[in-house]
Amino acid sequence: MRRISPPVTIPATAGAAPLERRGPDRRRFGWRTVLLGFFRSRRRRARRDGDRLHPFSDWHHPWLLFLGIGVMAMSATDAFLTLRLLEHGAVEANPFMRVLIHADIQWFVGIKLTLTGLGLMLLVYTSRVLLFRRIRVGLLITGFFCGYACLICYEYLGLLALGII
């Protein structure tokens, strides 16, 4: 015979009725949860009215995947083109990256790609959040994609002007 534990009453918040749950929490988190959540995600919108300002979900639009892969590829291309330009007398404008380039080129490339990847993960996770209650954060990824495209064109034109390409 299964023993039923007494109900647990959770106090009400913000005028809501108190919740009542029976028994221990049966949810478990593991790799199976991650994989099933990846392949069969269900939460595509905010569940409650109070979640509208912070609508985190299990599912992200495929367009964000395209933009994320594109930004990472262009970040790697930017690192390569920057190194090519530096070989021919150009100067790195970012002081933090300039220090890394002079210290070790492998550290420069690794840290550049790591910071870009972590920033993209944060932006994709918060892609539905409204920035200043007006702009969806997902639009920032599109902006970074366009910015990297312009930067690569600028670097390519610099390589053309130097006669490298």
Image: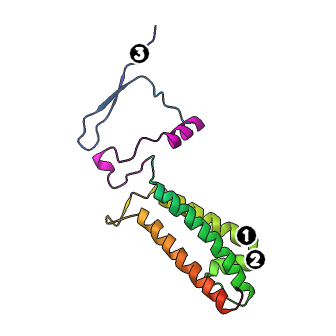
Question: Please, what is the three-letter code of the amino acid marked with disc 1?
Answer: Trp
Residue 103, numbered label: 2
Mark 2 and mark 1 in contact (Cβ < 8 Å)?
A: yes
Q: Residue at x 65, y 77 (%)?
A: 97
Q: Secondary structure at mark 3?
A: loop
Is residue 54 found left or right of 30 in the rendered image?
left
Give the residue pinned by disc 3. Answer: 4
Rendering coords of residue 38 (x, y %): 52, 43
Give the magenta-colored segment's residue range: 30-57
- The tag earlier along the polypeptide, 3 or 1, is 3
Q: Helix, strand, or loop for circle 1?
A: helix
**Disc on res. 107:** 1
Would residue 91 be counted in the magenta stretch?
no
Crowd around label 1: few <14 · some 14–19 · many ≥20 (10 Å): some
Tell which residue pokes out farthest to the left in this image.
Answer: 15
Residue 21 rendering spot, x and y as whole percentages: 36, 27
CB contact under 8 Å: marks 3 and 2: no
Give the spatial CA distance, label 3 vs label 2.
Answer: 64 Å
Which residue appears farthest toward the front when viewing the image? 165
Q: From where the camera sits, is residue 93 visible?
A: no
